[in-house]
């Protein structure tokens, strides 16, 4: 493929994460703390958000540059009107091998069937605790465990493959590690533990609130022995571990204590159409402006190609130089709720 883009560290462009809204019905403290994202916060007006036509056009361009996997995210993507219609359109793009969706699961019961019929075969549901009180606390008094579990059940019943994401934060939900592992082993869903990250500017991140990959493994291994597994493919984000007594697995996303920038092939587009080449980027490139101008596809392709070709991002590899162990960067980072993890 003549257009395939390699960045300055020889990493190809393979994955595109598309945020379809900056809004969310939760206020997880590590992502959209209520104090900042309260009633006075200005979310994007509809005309500033990429339309389905624009998302489809950009996705085709990204596929021509080597992207094979699309992930729909947010904010909460299920708040975006007619989302199954977008899934259907993206599924018809030649070259797209896989479409995923990351959701907080609260509305999944309602949309699981339509999403599946539109071509969504995989979903990742975020759930940080099975304890109603702790989950409510972590989600800014919005989340109900029962509703999320019903969403997971509905997605499973229609035939989707479901993975679970759990952010682990010291002092908040470390006591949920084992109950979550046991519950989802039993349900046969892969649970992925995510080290709490210094994304955005407002979550007050501190290194000592991170529970490391090794600590999580040690805790589970003591009760349910684990065995490390090879990655399924180059660039897989989660480290895989299999329970020795079964075929069930867990994953650990260790952005803080064992970073994986060298195989990072992910680009992200925010709801307002900015391209970010790293989760921790301080600068985005305005694609909305381009698709709304009279630039043709070749011109937009060349622009994205040049951005990717000049990419040098390795934030997690260099994290401690940036953060000095707390979330004190000098530049303003993009918010997680704008680019969706
Ligand atoms: N609202 C959807 C959800 O929660 O699944 C999609 C967007 S959310 C930003 C995507 C993922 O990022 C979720 O799994 C969430 O738990 C994770 N996330 C958000 N803030 C995080 C942080 N500070 N550290 C680690 N993961 C985080
Ligand atoms: Fe919303 Fe997801 Fe962020 Fe929680 S992690 S506030 S559910 S966007
Ligand atoms: Fe990729 Fe940036 Fe995360 Fe490194 S820090 S893995 S470059 S998104």
Image (cartoon, rainbow, N blue to C red):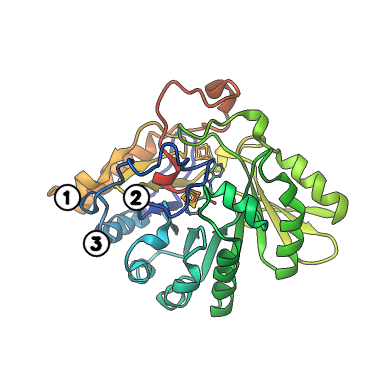
Q: CA distance from mark 2 to mark 1?
A: 23 Å
Q: CA distance from mark 3 to mark 1?
A: 11 Å
Residue 235 seen from this side: no
Q: Residue 240: x, y in percent?
A: 70, 53
Lower position in the chain sequence, tag 3 or tag 1: 3
Question: Looking at the rendering, in which quadrant would you find the N terminus?
Answer: bottom left
| Residue 191 falls left or right of residue 336 | right
What residue lies at 66% left-to-right and 42% top-to-bottom? 172
Q: What secondary structure is found at the residue carrying circle 3?
A: helix
| Residue 73 falls left or right of residue 89 | right
Q: Is residue 196 above or below residue 291?
A: above
| Residue 157 falls left or right of residue 21 | right
Which residue is nearer to you in this view: 57 or 131? 131
Q: What secondary structure is found at the residue carrying circle 1?
A: helix
Which residue is nearer to you in this view: 155 or 148? 148
Badge 3 is on which residue?
53
Badge 2 is on which residue?
3
């Amino acid at each position: 493929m003549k257009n395939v883009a390699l960045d300055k560290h020889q990493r190809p462009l393979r994955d595109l994460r598309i945020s379809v809204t900056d809004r969310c019905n939760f206020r997880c403290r590590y992502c959209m703390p209520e104090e900042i994202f309260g009633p006075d916060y200005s979310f994007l007006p509809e005309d500033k958000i990429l339309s389905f036509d624009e998302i489809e056009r950009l996705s085709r361009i990204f596929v021509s540059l080597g992207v094979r996997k699309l992930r729909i995210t947010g904010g909460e993507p299920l708040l975006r009107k007619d989302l199954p219609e977008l899934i259907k359109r993206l599924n018809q793009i030649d070259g797209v091998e896989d479409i995923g969706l990351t959701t907080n699961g609260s509305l999944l019961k309602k949309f699981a069937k339509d999403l599946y019929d539109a071509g969504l075969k995989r979903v990742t549901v975020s759930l940080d605790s099975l304890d109603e009180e702790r989950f409510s606390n972590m989600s800014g008094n919005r989340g109900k465990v029962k509703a999320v579990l019903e969403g997971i059940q509905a997605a499973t019943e229609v035939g989707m493959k479901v993975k679970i994401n759990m952010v682990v934060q010291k002092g908040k939900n470390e006591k949920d590690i084992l109950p979550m592992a046991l519950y989802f082993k039993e349900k046969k869903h892969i649970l992925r533990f995510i080290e709490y990250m210094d994304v955005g500017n407002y979550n007050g991140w501190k290194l000592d609130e991170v529970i490391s990959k090794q600590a999580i493994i040690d805790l589970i291994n003591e009760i349910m022995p684990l065995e490390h597994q090879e990655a399924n493919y180059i660039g897989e984000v989660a480290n895989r571990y299999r329970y020795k007594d079964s075929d069930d697995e867990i994953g650990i996303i260790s952005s803080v204590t064992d970073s994986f920038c060298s195989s990072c092939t992910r680009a992200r587009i925010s709801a307002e159409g900015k391209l970010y080449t790293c989760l921790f980027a301080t600068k985005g490139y305005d694609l909305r402006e381009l698709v709304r101008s009279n630039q043709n596809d070749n011109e937009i392709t060349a622009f994205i190609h040049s951005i990717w070709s000049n990419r040098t991002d390795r934030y997690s590899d260099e994290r401690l130089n940036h953060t000095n162990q707390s979330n004190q960067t000098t530049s303003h980072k993009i918010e997680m709720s704008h680019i969706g993890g």
